[in-house]
Amino acid sequence: MSYTDQVKEELTRKNRGDYQEQLTELSALIRVDGSIQISNQHLAVKVKLFHGNLARRIYSLIKDRFGFNIEIRVRRDKKFNLTRTYEILVTPQPGVREFLLELGFLTPKNKLVFNIKEEYMESRKLSQAYLRGLFLAGASVNSPKSEYHLEFRCERESLADDLSLLLSKFNLKAHRTRHKGNYVIYFKSYSDVIKILNIIGAHQAMLKMENDHIVKELKNNVNRRVNFETANLEKSVSAAMDQLENIRLIERERGLDTLTSGLQEMAEIRRENPYASLKELGEILGLSKSGVNHRLRRIKKIADQL
């Protein structure tokens, strides 16, 4: 099961909230996954879903709240024989028009509305319910173990505009792109993804992402530390090899006994401790790190003149 499916499973098990929250969530689901049909001059509503638990949630919500006669059709992908789709059909019957009016899909003059109902935009609680419905209907989120990415899919530009405005009310600045004819509203930062999961009520998924984020940061910090220390070690070894080569050159060309006693001692200690750091050499000689470095630079200067 993908991480997106895990989040949606958590949301479908979540308490439905009060009546207005349920209607708001349902409105978002129908906005993305539903269609309004006309049969013999009567209205009908069809919702196409890909998750069985979500289909049951929508069915029971419509049935319990409105008492409609509902048909359910389950189809299987003939090519792969794996993917199931669930079609919930509210057939033409008394109350469907009022149902669509209440959810914000029709005006009193029976004109279609393509914007989010103003009531859902103004109330924070209903805004959260609407975002939850949109996520259940057409959103996805990457696994916490990969790059952070959460997106909402919108077929109409009007929904994308309203969604961006709705998200801005939670201090979320969305990115937008087009993909396969859809408008995609997306986020790529850890903090934004976590915030959205919290807003829609996916708290278990949020905690898992926070935990995985901590583990990921610890691993990254360890890797950075190891890389840093490895680079320093390589630099130190390279410097030590150069110093030993300088000492060998002086010994071959003029002899170490021509050096001052301090430099001669430095050369001998370096040869005896080829992999020691400057700090370790200083501890042997009773010098500071800068004192050791000064003597080695003097040896290098003499070697460069040969």
Image (cartoon, helix red, strand yellow):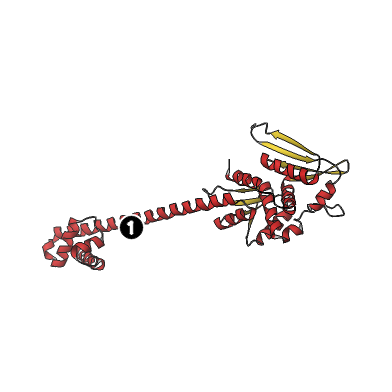
| Residue 180 in sight | no
| Residue 84 in sight | yes
- Residue at the spot 55% in from the left edge and 55% down from the top edge: 190
Q: Decide if residue 206 is on the left or right side of residue 184.
A: left
Q: Where on the picture, by quarter, is residue 44?
A: top right
Residue placed most toward the observer, 258 or 108: 108
Q: Amino acid at mark 1?
A: Asn
Return the x and y of residue 246 as percentages of the image width and height. 21, 60
- Residue at the spot 63% in from the left edge and 46% down from the top edge: 8
Residue placed most toward the observer, 123 or 219: 123
Q: Decide if residue 223 is on the left or right side of residue 72.
A: left
Return the x and y of residue 201 as percentages of the image width and height. 63, 52
Q: Where on the picture, by quarter, is residue 39?
A: top right
Instruction: State the quadrant of the C terminus.
Output: bottom left
Q: Decide if residue 89 is on the left or right side of residue 124.
A: right
Return the x and y of residue 170 as percentages of the image width and height. 64, 61
Q: Secondary structure at mark 1?
A: helix
Q: Is 216 drawn above or below residue 50 in the view shown?
A: below
Tally the marks. Answer: 1
**Neighbour tally class for label 1: few under 14, some 14-19, many 20 plus, Cα within 10 Å:** few
Instruction: State the quadrant of the N terminus.
Output: top right
Q: Decide if residue 50 is on the left or right side of residue 102.
A: left
Farthest residue to the left: give it: 257
- Residue at the spot 57% in from the left edge and 52% down from the top edge: 206
Residue placed most toward the observer, 64 or 6: 64
Residue placed most toward the observer, 83 or 245: 83
Return the x and y of residue 184 as percentages of the image width and height. 65, 52
Mark 1 = which residue? 232
